[in-house]
Image (cartoon, grey):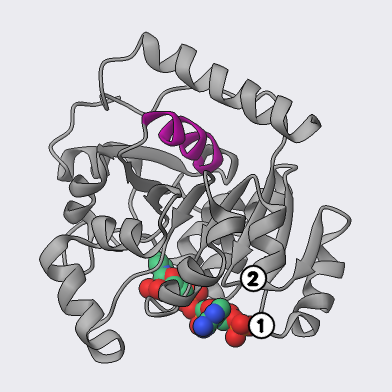
Amino acid sequence: MKFFRRAALIAIAAVATLAVLPAFSAAPQVNPPQKMRIGVIGSGSLGGSVGRAWIKAGHEVMFSSRNPDELRAMAKALGPLASVGTPKEAAAFGEIVLTALPYSALTSIGRDLQAELRGKIVIDASNPTRWSDGDLYQQAMRDGVGATSARLLPGTRLVRGFSAVNATAIAASSEGRRTTLAVPIASDDKAALVVASQLVRDARCAPVITGNLESSRVFEDGTPIDEADTDEATLRQLLKLPPN
Ligand SMILES: NC(=O)c1ccc[n+]([C@@H]2O[C@H](COP(=O)([O-])OP(=O)(O)OC[C@H]3O[C@@H](n4cnc5c(N)ncnc54)[C@H](OP(=O)(O)O)[C@@H]3O)[C@@H](O)[C@H]2O)c1
């Protein structure tokens, strides 16, 4: 019951905020009513950096691995908000889930963890690569990575996020060692964008909403936006968006 009450509060806050916003104009300023439980699937460079930043913000994060024992020392060092599990356990644990995997692995995650992920906001940072993803790479280039991830993770409220920024830049921003890093995000689900925007801010980065999932093409691999690793004003200029 507690989980559903919390999810309902998040949804009400999101809808109330969006009611007064022009569509996709700027990342809305809203604080989640409470700290969240987040499952991280793929706890390597990207998942590890973002997960650590969320722990610092006070969220509960379950890092997952196919060999969870390998993550126990890291989680112990992060303190009581960090835990470790399998990808299935992290998918079940998270109110929100971050996927940061070799792109082809999304196929099995979407198929095997469909029940655990159903209806959840999934922030997908995974990028297809020409040399390791074969046909899936070709499909993603044709249909868009956003549309392809949404197809591979059916039933989720998909957000593309943290896919076009470097893990080391995220870590530096979250630790205050550089100017605040701008993170482009996109989704067809506006309420999910409100929550994702807040989570980007919680990682001490600045969300820049490009629009719906199709719009995430502007920050795919090979675009000038990908790994620009810049500040919000510069990123908005590059994207030809008005200043925030
Ligand atoms: N690194 C960056 O700066 C960066 C920036 C933006 C986007 N990305 C994207 O994020 C994704 C991950 O990149 P990364 O650099 O973090 O890679 P990484 O350090 O190699 O981590 C990938 C993680 O995925 C897990 N994994 C691999 N195959 C899996 C499977 N079949 N099922 C479940 N988990 C699996 C591995 O965990 P276990 O082996 O422990 O299970 C591993 O820890 C890529 O798609 C990349 O394009 C990375």
What label does residue 87 carry, if any? 2
Residue type at tag 2: Pro
Membership of 168 in magenta stretch: no
Q: Is residue 177 visible?
A: no
Q: How crowded is mark 2: few (under 14 residues within 10 Å), some or many (20 or more)?
A: many
Q: Name the residue under label 1.
A: 66
The CB of the residue at mark 2 lies under 8 Å from ligand 1: yes
Residue 36 vs residue 89, the one in the foreground = 89
Q: Where is residue 56 in the image (x, y as percent from the top left)?
A: 72, 48
Residue 106 vs residue 177, the one in the foreground = 106
Q: Do the residues labelled 1 and 2 touch (CB within 8 Å)?
A: yes
| Relative to 116, residue 9 above or below | above
| Relative to 129, residue 28 above or below | above
Say which quarter of the image contains residue 242: top left
Over which residues does the magenta segment extend?
190-200
How far is disc 1 from disc 2 in space, using C-alphas?
7 Å
Residue type at tag 1: Arg
The CB of the residue at mark 1 lies under 8 Å from ligand 1: yes
Which residue is at 75% across, 42% downward?
58
Which residue is at 56% across, 55% downward?
117
Q: Where is residue 120 in the image (x, y as percent from the top left)?
A: 54, 45
Q: Position of residue 8 (x, y in %)?
A: 63, 24
Say which quarter of the image contains residue 125: bottom left
Q: How crowded is mark 1: few (under 14 residues within 10 Å), some or many (20 or more)?
A: few
| Relative to 168, residue 60 above or below | above
Say which quarter of the image contains residue 12: top right
Q: Is mark 1 on a helix, strand or loop?
A: loop
